[in-house]
Image: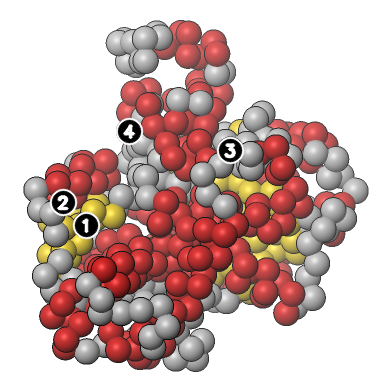
Amino acid sequence: MNKELILGKNIQNWLWEYPLLRKMIKTEEVFWINPKLTNFNEASKNLSLTEEDVLDARNRLERFAPYISKVFPETMKTKGIIESPLVEISNMKKLIENQYDFYLPGNLFLKCDSHLPISGSIKARGGIYEVLTHAEKLAAENNKLSLEDDYSVLDSNEFREFFSQYSIAVGSTGNLGLSIGIMSAKIGFNVTVHMSADAKQWKKDLLKSKGVNVIEYDSDYSKAVEEGRKQALSDEKCYFIDDENSKTLFLGYAVAASRLKQQLDEINIIIDKDHPLFVYLPCGVGGGPGGVAFGLKLIFKDNVHCFFGEPTHSPCMLLGLMTQEHDRVCVQDFGIDNITDADGLAVGRASGFVGKTLEHMISGDYTVQDETLYTLLKSLADSENIYLEPSALASIAGAINLFKIDSGYKYLSKNSLEKSIKNATHISWATGGSMVPKNEMYQYYRKGSLQD
Ligand SMILES: *Cc1c(COP(=O)(O)O)cnc(C)c1O
């Protein structure tokens, strides 16, 4: 255990103030309910981002849709809108109820961001959006594009040549690099992805095949981000996409909410006081799940309950929210190693911007062991024939833990949900997986089999 002071306090003081830390340090699974959760009106006071900002992002993506559908033919069906299916997984619900011996009141759905076109993860929302935002800005500043134009003109040698004077840098554990690398290379930017040690070889290979510069580090995500930031500082034509602080990324993710509302409407699912919505989001640095949760709160307000899920070895958002120290602490300060097979969630220090923005809106945060992720991966494949990467299964664990663990039940009673819970809609946000190569996926599935 760490004998040094952490933010001026010794470890005994920390443990006394936050008893849950003891279990977190032992990397045991925990379920934390946010004592600072308030009603939406209260929580949304003094926020720097608004509904208009999200609408602006939605409109920007619509402007780019003709271009997207032209250069990524897999988006032709949706006319260039990058969106994922919402599917009910009632077989999986039955299977986990048996496996974990509990009852989940209401219906269980999977939001398949795992199957988002272009980059196969939730990062196809924020990452692609920020690259497009930057491209639009550069083109407009140089009088090459106006809001009324048909943006499919961007698919031309003239524009590719124009964008090739500029570069993009980003640090990533893998999936953000994929989305930003693929999009940037397509539009014509010079792009460099700084990859942490967690990043899978196939992701690096895929990026290199698309002409992306990939720089690899032996260290974790924070180091990769730092190096990306450094690269951009030394070159004024280089734009750094800052996963730890970017409001643009956050807004790109937030657009998911109004699209989800539309999908729920289409299948006649009402969300109101008597029909609550529960959403379980795998969390790394926080931008993806945070942006989605923010968008959902704007629409459904107090009728949506958002929970973040993290690996037991990387509970950075939980640590930041609980102590209210946000990015001033990291899991390594407390001797937690940030080593997990859930590579998309292998982050030791959470985004301070996201934690502070959502500190009164997030219902809670729970942690999951890697072994549980593999077991759930196999269960979902067996029951629904849907294959996800390990990180994404943290979303299913949320629905289980809320109803299996005492602290979960406390949340329901504290928020007077005992009656309405039978009408609940649960959405596990499946954040990635469709691009994982078959042989890798087979290894994951086998690990799930070994856990039984
Ligand atoms: C990045 C990622 C997340 C979490 O997003 P953050 O913005 O890092 O919190 C969750 N799941 C997968 C598969 C990811 O790649």
Above or below: residue 298 compared with residue 44? below
Between the C-alphas of marks 1 and 3, the distance is 29 Å
The mark lying in front, picked from 1 and 3, is 3
Residue that numbered label 4 is attached to: 337
Above or below: residue 442 compared with residue 146? above
| Callout 3–callout 2 Cβ contact below 8 Å | no
Q: Secondary structure at mark 1?
A: strand
| Callout 2–callout 1 Cβ contact below 8 Å | yes
Toward the viewer: 212 or 80?
Answer: 80
In the image, residue 235 lies at what x, y percent?
Answer: 10, 53
Residue that numbered label 1 is attached to: 239
The answer to whether 192 appears left or right of 26 in the picture is left
In the image, residue 154 lies at what x, y percent?
Answer: 28, 84
The mark lying in front, picked from 2 and 4, is 2
In the image, residue 58 lies at what x, y percent?
Answer: 52, 70
Q: Secondary structure at mark 3?
A: loop
| Callout 2–callout 4 Cβ contact below 8 Å | no
Q: Who comes first in sequence, dot 1 or dot 4? A: 1
Between the C-alphas of marks 2 and 4, the distance is 29 Å
Q: Amino acid at mark 3?
A: Asn
Above or below: residue 313 compared with residue 125? above
Are there few (<14), some (14-19), or many (20+) residues within 10 Å of tag 2?
some
Q: Amino acid at mark 1?
A: Tyr
Please tell me how many numbered marks the rendered image carries: 4
| Callout 1–callout 4 Cβ contact below 8 Å | no
Q: Amino acid at mark 4?
A: Asp
- Residue 232's label in the rendered image is 2
